[in-house]
Image (cartoon, helix red, strand yellow):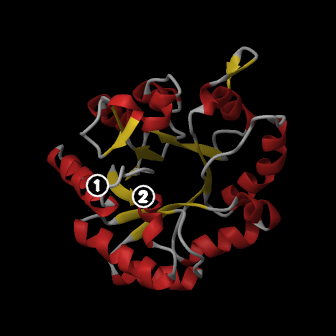
Amino acid sequence: MKIGAQFYTVRDYCKDLDSFAESLKKVADIGYTTVQISGVCEYSPEWLKAELKKNGLQCVITHTNGDQMVADPQKVARDHEIFGCKYIGIGGYGFDGEDVEIFKTKYSSVAEVFKNNGQYFMYHNHAHEFKKIGDQLMIEWLADAIPADQMGFTLDTYWVQYGGGDPAQWIEKLSGRVPCIHLKDMAYGQKMAPIGEGNINFDRVFEKAERAGTEYMLVEQDDSNGEDPFDCLRRSFDFLKAQGLK
């Protein structure tokens, strides 16, 4: 398994191409070699390919606008081919007040296009996927809605725990469908924290992730609580390296 940085953590430093390029260099200088691109300014796939190469980085997954996926999944697939990214995800989906069947209707064909192009559609959870719909949790309904060979889960350790679940247990339950996961720690008061500075049992997370076929573990911290997000990424990186991960 490889560790990486989720760029949503430093989204406020990626509002134009110059600052985005500088942020890619900063993350590479910390020691990360893989990244997820999410929440940044608009970019061309050719630009991103060049900047990744310049910094010795590989983009392994994105969060991409869902409307763009639905409107032209072939273009989204081709764009990701340019910078060599297999996993194409959405950052979440607002189900409140909306029939969950709509999700299946909207994204089944998108997932099929990606599969046929050798890519994989990924769904990133928050806490609301751990609410019940009838006799099933929403995340269970989602797992049944689109086949495992067409949709995986970028399981987020913080949001699983926030929703009342056990992150390691859910990685195990979704084994084979979690090639990428988000590492995010939870400190007292449900505060987001660098990895190793909160209370999530990451020893179990790492054990279950390896058994579940996880390839990439992306560090994400939506809220750095007033601290420098690059320093938070560095502290997470140092902790993970000390655990023998790289």
Task: Please identify the quarter of the rendering in which residue 211 is found.
Answer: top left
Q: Where is residue 182 in the image (x, y as percent from the top left)?
A: 43, 46
In this rendering, is residue 92 above or below 99? Answer: below
The answer to whether marks 1 and 2 mark residues whose Cβ atoms lie closer than 8 Å is yes
Drawn side of residue 104 relative to residue 139, left or right: right
Look at label 2 and name its amino acid: Thr
Q: In which quarter of the image is the C terminus?
A: bottom left
- Residue at 35 percent across and 33 percent down: it is 205
User: What separation in Å lies between label 1 and label 2 (alpha carbons)?
Assistant: 9 Å
Q: Residue furthest left?
A: 242
- Residue at 49 percent across and 83 percent down: it is 17
- Residue at 61 percent across and 59 percent down: it is 119
Q: How crowded is mark 2: few (under 14 residues within 10 Å), some or many (20 or more)?
A: many
Q: Position of residue 144 (x, y in %)?
A: 71, 31
Q: Where is residue 94 in the image (x, y as percent from the top left)?
A: 71, 42
- As drawn, the label of residue 9 is 2
Q: Residues within 10 Å of mark 1 (few under 14, many from 20)?
A: many
- Residue at 72 percent across and 58 percent down: it is 66
Disc with the residue nearer the chain's start (1 vs 2): 2
Q: Which residue lies furthest to the top in this view?
A: 135
Q: Can the viewer see residue 41?
A: yes
In this rendering, is residue 79 above or below 124? Answer: below
Drawn side of residue 226 relative to residue 78, left or right: left
- As drawn, the label of residue 148 is none
Which residue, given by chain and number where applicable, does mark 1 sit on? 232
Look at label 1 and name its amino acid: Cys
Q: Where is residue 75 in the image (x, y as percent from the top left)?
A: 72, 73
Q: Can the viewer see residue 245?
A: no
Element class at badge 2: helix
